[in-house]
Image (cartoon, rainbow, N blue to C red):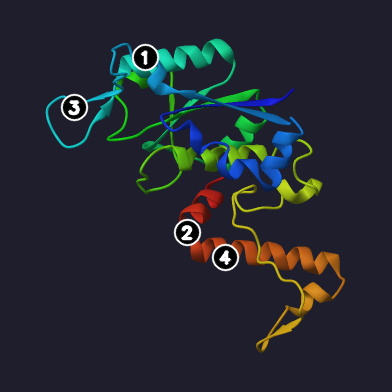
Amino acid sequence: MTFAATVLTLYPEMFPGPLGVSLAGRALEERRWSLDTVQIRDFASDKHRTVDDTPAGGGAGMVLKVDVLAAAIDHARSLQPDCPVLAMTPRGKPLTQERVRELASGPGVTVLCGRFEGFDERIFAGREVEEVSVGDIVLSGGEPAALMLLDACVRLLPGVMGAVDSGTEESFENGLLEYPHYTRPVEWEGSSIPDVLRSGDHAKIAAWRKERSEEDTQARRPDLWDRFNRK
């Protein structure tokens, strides 16, 4: 089964972008996943192909029109009826590695990219759209966030990463940050690779990595550490 990605956007020329190179690009060439873009403007009904309007109640900026969005989503769902529709928005639920893994194990995903002040709120309930955030930041549009989401999914698809363990021994996979890595040269500007990593004792190495993973998570991401301890 090929993972099918459909992106609803006002700027289809932004894709595949970085998804066309490296692991994702090679997987795309090998047809391990597919990527289609849908121009939201094609679903505007007036002669000017208007996709936005002023905010109800006043205020700065423009808002994407619910009727245009609904028509674009309906079209995408007719092509991929089993794929969830995700809208990239800072008001959404934070994206997690757990959710990425769920998406990557499914048939694919339809990603809705916003612009301007965002979406007419009625689209989320009206079309069962999942709101997703990639961080407490505001971007100029949803396209960079969509690229991030799709990259995170594609790298988990079977056969995309070379090493089987690459997708499991990573930050967030077990609820913690990943342990630090080192490679040659052994000595660099007075700093050395920890002795334990050169010991050849795999049990000691595993224990060191677990300890460092816990220490770094506690120091750098106390929110993750608290969540980990509540499990």
Query: Mark 4 or mark 2, which is nearer the start of the sequence?
Result: 4
Separation of marks 2 and 1 at Cα, in angstroms: 37 Å
Viewed as shown, does residue 188 lie left or right of 147? right
Residue mark closest to the camera, 3 vs 4: 3
Q: Quadrant of residue 15?
A: top right
Label at residue 54: 3
Q: Residue furthest left?
A: 58
Residue mark closest to the camera, 2 vs 1: 1
Q: Secondary structure at mark 1?
A: helix
Q: Secondary structure at mark 4?
A: helix
Query: Mark 1 or mark 3, which is nearer the start of the sequence?
Result: 3
Q: Which residue is mark 4?
A: 216
Label at residue 126: 1
**Residue 127 in sight here:** no
Q: How far across and down, in percent of the image, does residue 22 sit?
A: 69, 48
- Which residue is at a point 27% across and 35% down the rendered structure image? 117
Q: Amino acid at mark 4?
A: Asp
Q: Which residue is mark 2?
A: 222
